[in-house]
Amino acid sequence: MNQSSARAPRKSRRLPNWLRWTRTMKTAFLDQLAASCDVAQAAAAIGVEPIQIYALYRRDARFREQWQEALAAGYQLLETRLMGHALDTGETPGAGTPPATQLALQLLQFRHGAAKPARRPPKTMTPPTAEQVDAAILKKLAAIERRKARDSQD
């Protein structure tokens, strides 16, 4: 038995070449994303693959904005739940048991860091022209010559 026949056959799940996104699908995905903060889980909930979601994310600027809003809402919900857990001592109020201060501080610190604006999607790169490449090379060669001249003077 050779090695190639010993391998298990690969399952290939062929994704459709295109997917018609309806407002209902987008809304359902965004609702699930806000509830779970998990793209794969939200995609599965509407019956699509994460790669299809990410393709829509790259193409649709409005969807990207809604995605960020859904994640912000999801993280707010998560933070609220975790903060409640951190502050819950399991005792009656006023019993004197301190809350889980470290967890609460970490959550607040995370919240402060998460307030930064989201990265912009990468711009589509166009290959440089031959003139741009030549100019960049000549600029670097000139810098090397200047450095050599400076080093020889020292």
Image (cartoon, rainbow, N blue to C red):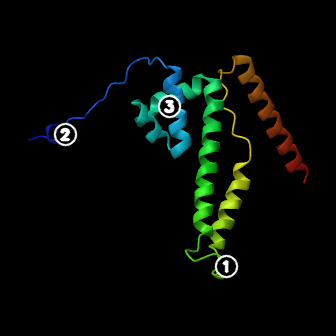
Q: Is residue 55 above or below residue 8?
A: above
Camera-side mark, 3 or 1? 1
What residue type is disc 1 on?
Gly
Q: Residue at x 67, y 57 (%)?
A: 110
- Looking at the figure, which quarter contains the N terminus? top left
What residue type is disc 3 on?
Ala
The foreground one among 31 and 12 is 31
Q: Is residue 135 above or below residue 87?
A: above
Q: Tell me which corner region of the image, top left, top right, bottom left or bottom right, holds residue 143.
A: top right
The foreground one among 43 and 4 is 43
What residue type is disc 2 on?
Ala
Query: Dot 3 lies on which element?
Result: helix
Q: Which residue is mark 3?
A: 28
In the picture as drawn, the residue positioned furthest to the left comes out as 1
Q: Which residue is mark 2?
A: 8
- Residue 23 spot, x, y in % from top left: 53, 21
Q: Residue at x 59, y 45 (%)?
A: 74
Camera-side mark, 2 or 1? 1
Q: Is residue 22 above or below residue 79?
A: above
Q: Residue at x 66, y 31 (%)?
A: 65
Q: Who comes first in sequence, dot 2 or dot 1?
A: 2
- Residue 121 spot, x, y in % from top left: 65, 31
Q: Which residue is mark 1?
A: 94
- Residue 94 spot, x, y in % from top left: 67, 79
Q: Tell me which corner region of the image, top left, top right, bottom left or bottom right, holds residue 12.
A: top left
Camera-side mark, 2 or 3? 3
